[in-house]
C-alpha cells in the first residue's frame, strides 16, 4: 500500500500500534504493576465461584457459648482429651486441632491424659507454627510438646501469610525451616484420613539453609463463603454429649476457636475485613478444596503473555481498517476477553490466569490509537494550515471594515457626487462640510443616512473614532436616484470593538485555526457556487471522458431536463438531444470536437440553436483536481437577443436600401426629368412628387416611432386615462375615415386609469385605426370599444374588411412583414405599424392579440394593466 507524506500506510500504522502495545504488555507482565488489579479481579471472580463444603467435614467451634460454660481460655487440656474421647465414641474418622500445644501445661497429668486420648483415637492431627520468638530472633519451628507430638497421627503447619493488600487468599502446601517438610494442616488431615485426590501434594521437598523458611506449592482456596458457612457444632455440646453420634460418625473434624477476640482472624476475598474468618474455618476451607480437588493453581505468566500477544495481534490487524466506534467496541471486547478466560478457567479447571496485563493492554490500545490519530491529525492540520496560508484567496471584504477615506473615494467614484467631505472626531480629513452641515448628527442616528435637499450624510463609528461622511449632489433628481441605494448600505460597526479570545492550548488553537479556515473555505465555496448558479450563462463541467459532472441552474432550465438526469450524461448526447433539426450535427462531429479539445488542449467556439434560443458554446479544457487527465468546461452564452438585433439590423438595412430609397429615387428622377424638359410643371406631376414625399416621410416616421417605443421605460410613465386616449385617436383619423367613406363608432363610458405614456399609446391606437380604415371597404363601420376587464383595460378595434389568412396571422406583429393577401396587401406601409403596437403593449406590461376570420373582418384587442390615479 502506498503512503503519502500526510498519511502513513496501513502497514506502517499497524506497526506503530503493535510495537508500543507489545512493549507495554511485556512491561506489565514482568513487573508487579498490575498486581493490585489482578487481586481485585480475583476477589471479584472468586465470589462467583464459591465451593460448597464436603459432607464428611464438620467443625467443632470453640464459640462464645463454650467459653461461657467452660471459663476463661486457655482451658485445661483434660477438656480436649474428653472431647477426643467423645469424638472417638461417635466414630469421627480424623480430628484436627487448630490449637497450639507448644508449651507444657501446669499439670503434667493433663498432658498425659490428652496424649492418651490421642493414642486411643489414633488419627489426631496437631498444628505446628513457624514464627520468631521475638522481634530480634530468627524464625523457629514451634511443634507441640514431645508427648503430644509422639501421640499425634500427623503434624501440619498452620502458617498463613497475607497478600500485599492484607487479604489472605491461599496457603503454601509445604513449608519448613531448611526444608519444606511440613505439609499444611489440611494436607496432613488428607494424608492421615487416607483420602486419594488428584491434587495430592507429591512434589519434591525443596531445601535451603536451616534458618530459611522454605515454602513451596502455593495454592488459592475457593472459599465456601462468609464466617459460619461451614457445618459446625459447639464444643460444649459435643463435650456434654448433646450432639447425636450420627452427626459425627466418619467425619473429619476440625477443632478451633471461632469466638470473636480469640485466635487468628483472617480477612478473605469473600469476607473482607469486616467479617474475617477464624483460623479453623480457613483450614477447613483449605481441606474442603483439597478433598474436592478444587485448589486453585496459578497459571504460568507465559500464558498471560501469549493471551495478551493474541489481543495485540487482533488490534494491529483491525484498528487501522475499522471506524472509531468499531475499534472502541473491539478494545472493550478484548479488555473483557482475559477476564472471561480467567473466569472460565477458574470455574472449570480451578486455574488462575492473571488477566491484568492483557486486559490493561487492550484497554490502553484505544487511547494509544487515538493519541496516534490525534498526532497524525495535528501534523495534518499543521501542513494544511500552512498550505491554506499559501493559497490565494478572493477577498471582497465588508463595507464595515473598509477604511473611511477609501470608502469615500469609492462612493465618489460610483455615484459621481459634485462634492464630498469626511470628518473624524469633528476634525476634517477630506473636504469641508458645506455651510449648514456643521451640526453633528446625534449618536442614536448612527449608521443611518440623513438626507437634506441635495446633500446626504451619515455618522458611523470605526476603529475607536466617530466619523461623518457627506455627499453633495448636483440636483434634487440626482439625490432622489441614489438615496435608496445609500439607505441600503451598512457602515456602522457599533461603539465597542469585539474582543477575540484565543486559546493558548496547542490543539485547541489548531482546531480554532481549522475552524476559521473551514469557514473561509465554506464562504469561498458558497461564493463560487452562488456565482456559478446565478451566472447568466450556462456552465457544464465534464470529466476526462466527456461525461457531465456538474451543471448550473441555467442548463436544466434551457434544455428542459431534470438536473439529476444531467449528471452522468455524455456531453455529445446532451448537445444532440437539444439542438433543432436545422442546426443538429451528427454525433460523430460532436465526438470529434470533444476528442480534439481533450487531446490537443485547445479551445473551440460553436454556434448552437436550442429550440428558439441562440447559444454560443465555448469549450475549453481544464485540469481537474487530483486527476491526471483534463476535463472540459463548457460555457453556453444566450445570444438570442444579439441574433435578433443582428436580424433587425439586416432588415433595417434592407428597409432603408429598398423601401426608403425607392420613393426618394423616384422623386429625384421626376425632378431631373422636369429640369431637362424646362416646361411648366403639370399638377399631376406635383401630386406624384408630393405622394412620394409623403411616402418617404411615413416610412421614416414609422421607423422613428418604433425606435422610441423600444426605448420606453417606466421613468416616462405617468397617470393617463384610456378612454381619453381612444377619443383622441378617433379624432386624429376622422379625416382619413371620411376620405375612405368609413364610419367610426366609439363605445366607452367608464374612465379607466393606467400608468403609462399617453403619447405612444395614442399612436398605437392610431396605427390600429389606420390599418382598419385602410383595408375596410366603403360604407362600412370601424368599431372602437373601451371596457373594464377586471384588473386590465381592454381597447378593441374591429373592422369589416376581408380578414387575414390563417397562415399569415402569426406574422402580423413582426417588423418588416407585410400581408401579401387581401387585407394587408397593397403598397401601403412598411410592416412597422403593428410591430410598434406590440412593442408599446409590452413596454406597458400588456398584450395585444388578433381575432380574424377571412371574409368577416378582424379585431385587434389591446389589454393594459389598470392602476388607481395618484
Image (spheres, rainbow, N blue to C red):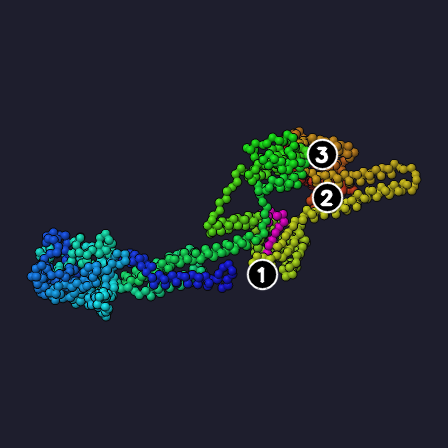
Left or right: residue 66 compared with residue 431: left
Q: Earlier in the sequence, mark 2 or mark 3?
A: 3
The residue that mark 2 highlights is: 815
Name the residue beneath numbered marker 1.
628
Q: Which residues are magenta?
A: 529-543
- In the rendered image, the residue lying farthest to the right is 678
Q: For the residues marked 3 and 1, what is the alpha-carbon distance in whole angstroms?
A: 65 Å
Q: Badge 1: few (under 14), some or many (20 or more) residues near its Cα, within 10 Å?
A: few
Q: Which of the 4 image quarters holds residue 859?
A: top right
Please determine whether, in this image, residue 311 is positioned above or below residue 838.
below
* Tag 3 and tag 1, C-beta contact below 8 Å: no
Residue 539 lies within the magenta run: yes
Residue at x-position 70% and y-position 48%: 643
Which sits in the foreground, 624 or 499? 499
Q: Which residue is mark 3?
A: 759
**Secondary structure type for disc 3:** helix
**Callout 1: SS:** loop
Image position, residue 33 (x, y; %): 33, 59
In the image, 765 versus 721, the foreground residue is 721
> Camera-side residue: 293 or 122?
122
As for residue 800 lying within the magenta part, the answer is no
151 up-or-down from 564: above or below = below
Place of residue 487 in the rendered image (x, y in percent of width and height, measured from the top left): 60, 36
> Decide: marks 1, 2 in contact (CB < 8 A)?
no
Amino acid at each position: 500500500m502506498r503512503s503519502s507524506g500526510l498519511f502513513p500506510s496501513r502497514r506502517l500504522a499497524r506497526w506503530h500500534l503493535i510495537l508500543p502495545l507489545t512493549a507495554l504488555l511485556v512491561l506489565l507482565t514482568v513487573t508487579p504493576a498490575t498486581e493490585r488489579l489482578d487481586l481485585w479481579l480475583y476477589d471479584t471472580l472468586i465470589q462467583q465461584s464459591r465451593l460448597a463444603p464436603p459432607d464428611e467435614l464438620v467443625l467443632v467451634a470453640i464459640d462464645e457459648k463454650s467459653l461461657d460454660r467452660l471459663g476463661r481460655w486457655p482451658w485445661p487440656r483434660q477438656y480436649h482429651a474428653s472431647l477426643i474421647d467423645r469424638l472417638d465414641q461417635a466414630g469421627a474418622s480424623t480430628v484436627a486441632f487448630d490449637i497450639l500445644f507448644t508449651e507444657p501445661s501446669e499439670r503434667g497429668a493433663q498432658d498425659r491424659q490428652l496424649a492418651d486420648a490421642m493414642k486411643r483415637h489414633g488419627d489426631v492431627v496437631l498444628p505446628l507454627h513457624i514464627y520468631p520468638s521475638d522481634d530480634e530472633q530468627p524464625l523457629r519451628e514451634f511443634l507441640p510438646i514431645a508427648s503430644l507430638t509422639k501421640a499425634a497421627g500427623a503434624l501440619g503447619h498452620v502458617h498463613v501469610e497475607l497478600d500485599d493488600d492484607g487479604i489472605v487468599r491461599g496457603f503454601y502446601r509445604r513449608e519448613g525451616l531448611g526444608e519444606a517438610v511440613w505439609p499444611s494442616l489440611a494436607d496432613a488431615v488428607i494424608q492421615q484420613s487416607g483420602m486419594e485426590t488428584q491434587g495430592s501434594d507429591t512434589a519434591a521437598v525443596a531445601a535451603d539453609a536451616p534458618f530459611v523458611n522454605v515454602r513451596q506449592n502455593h495454592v488459592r482456596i475457593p472459599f465456601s463463603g462468609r464466617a459460619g458457612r461451614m457445618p459446625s457444632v459447639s464444643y460444649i455440646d459435643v463435650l456434654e454429649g448433646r450432639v447425636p453420634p450420627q452427626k459425627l460418625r466418619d467425619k473429619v473434624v476440625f477443632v478451633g476457636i471461632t469466638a470473636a477476640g480469640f485466635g487468628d482472624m483472617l480477612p478473605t476475598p469473600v469476607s473482607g475485613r469486616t467479617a474475617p474468618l477464624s483460623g479453623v474455618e480457613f483450614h477447613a476451607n483449605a481441606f474442603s478444596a483439597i478433598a474436592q480437588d478444587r485448589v486453585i493453581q496459578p497459571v504460568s505468566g507465559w500464558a498471560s503473555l501469549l493471551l495478551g500477544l493474541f489481543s495485540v495481534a487482533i488490534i494491529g490487524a483491525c484498528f487501522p481498517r475499522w471506524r472509531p466506534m468499531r475499534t472502541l467496541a473491539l478494545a472493550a471486547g478484548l479488555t473483557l476477553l482475559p477476564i472471561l478466560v480467567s473466569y472460565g478457567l477458574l470455574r472449570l479447571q480451578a486455574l488462575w490466569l492473571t488477566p491484568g496485563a492483557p486486559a490493561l493492554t487492550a484497554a490502553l490500545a484505544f487511547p494509544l490509537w487515538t493519541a496516534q490519530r490525534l498526532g497524525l491529525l495535528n501534523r495534518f492540520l499543521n501542513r494544511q494550515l500552512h498550505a491554506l496560508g499559501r493559497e490565494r484567496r478572493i477577498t471582497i471584504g465588508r463595507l464595515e471594515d473598509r477604511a473611511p477615506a477609501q470608502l469615500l473615494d469609492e462612493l465618489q467614484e460610483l455615484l459621481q457626487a459634485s462634492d464630498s467631505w469626511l470628518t473624524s472626531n469633528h476634525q476634517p480629513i477630506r473636504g469641508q462640510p458645506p455651510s449648514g452641515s456643521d451640526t453633528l448628527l446625534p449618536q442614536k442616528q448612527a449608521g443611518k443616512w440623513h438626507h437634506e435637499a441635495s446633500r446626504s450624510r451619515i455618522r458611523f463609528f470605526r476603529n475607536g473614532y466617530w466619523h461623518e461622511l457627506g455627499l453633495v449632489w448636483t440636483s434634487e433628481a440626482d439625490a432622489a436616484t441614489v438615496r435608496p441605494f445609500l439607505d441600503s448600505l451598512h457602515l456602522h460597526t457599533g461603539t465597542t470593538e469585539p474582543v477575540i479570545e484565543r486559546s493558548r492550548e496547542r490543539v485547541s488553537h489548531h482546531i480554532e485555526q481549522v475552524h476559521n479556515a473551514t469557514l473561509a473555505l465554506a464562504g469561498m465555496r458558497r461564493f463560487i457556487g452562488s456565482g456559478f448558479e446565478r451566472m447568466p450563462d450556462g456552465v457544464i463541467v465534464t470529466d476526462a471522458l466527456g461525461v457531465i459532472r456538474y451543471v448550473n441552474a441555467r442548463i436544466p432550465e434551457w434544455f428542459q431536463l431534470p438536473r439529476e438526469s444531467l449528471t452522468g450524461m455524455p456531453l455529445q448526447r446532451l448537445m444532440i438531444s437539444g439542438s433543432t433539426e436545422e442546426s443538429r450535427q451528427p454525433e460523430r462531429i460532436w465526438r470529434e470536437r470533444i476528442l480534439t479539445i481533450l487531446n490537443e488542449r485547445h479551445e473551440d467556439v460553436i454556434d448552437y440553436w436550442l429550440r428558439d434560443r441562440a447559444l454560443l458554446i465555448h469549450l475549453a479544457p481544464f485540469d481537474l483536481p487530483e486527476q491526471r487527465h483534463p476535463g472540459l468546461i463548457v460555457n453556453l452564452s444566450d445570444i438570442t437577443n444579439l441574433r435578433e438585433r443582428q436580424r433587425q439590423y439586416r432588415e433595417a438595412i434592407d428597409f432603408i436600401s429598398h423601401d426608403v430609397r425607392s420613393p426618394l429615387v423616384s422623386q429625384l428622377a421626376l425632378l431631373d426629368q422636369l429640369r431637362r424638359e424646362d416646361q411648366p410643371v403639370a399638377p399631376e406631376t406635383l401630386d406624384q412628387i408630393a405622394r412620394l414625399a409623403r411616402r418617404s416621410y411615413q416610412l421614416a416616421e414609422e421607423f422613428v416611432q418604433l425606435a422610441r417605443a423600444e426605448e420606453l421605460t417606466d421613468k416616462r410613465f405617468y397617470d393617463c386615462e384610456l378612454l381619453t386616449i381612444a377619443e383622441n385617436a378617433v379624432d386624429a383619423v376622422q379625416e382619413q375615415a371620411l376620405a375612405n367613406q368609413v364610419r367610426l363608432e366609439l363605445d366607452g363610458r367608464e374612465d379607466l386609469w393606467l400608468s403609462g405614456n399617453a403619447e405612444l399609446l395614442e399612436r398605437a391606437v392610431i396605427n390600429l385605426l389606420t390599418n382598419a380604415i385602410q383595408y375596410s371597404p366603403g360604407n362600412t363601420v370601424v368599431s372602437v370599444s373601451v371596457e373594464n376587464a377586471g384588473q386590465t383595460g381592454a381597447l378593441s378595434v374591429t373592422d369589416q374588411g376581408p380578414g387575414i389568412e390563417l397562415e399569415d396571422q402569426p406574422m402580423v406583429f413582426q417588423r418588416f412583414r407585410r400581408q401579401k393577401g387581401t387585407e394587408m396587401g397593397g403598397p401601403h406601409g412598411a410592416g412597422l405599424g403593428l410591430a410598434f403596437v406590440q412593442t408599446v403593449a409590452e413596454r406597458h406590461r400588456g398584450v395585444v392579440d388578433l381575432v380574424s376570420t377571412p371574409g368577416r373582418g378582424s379585431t385587434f384587442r389591446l389589454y393594459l394593466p389598470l392602476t388607481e390615479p395618484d
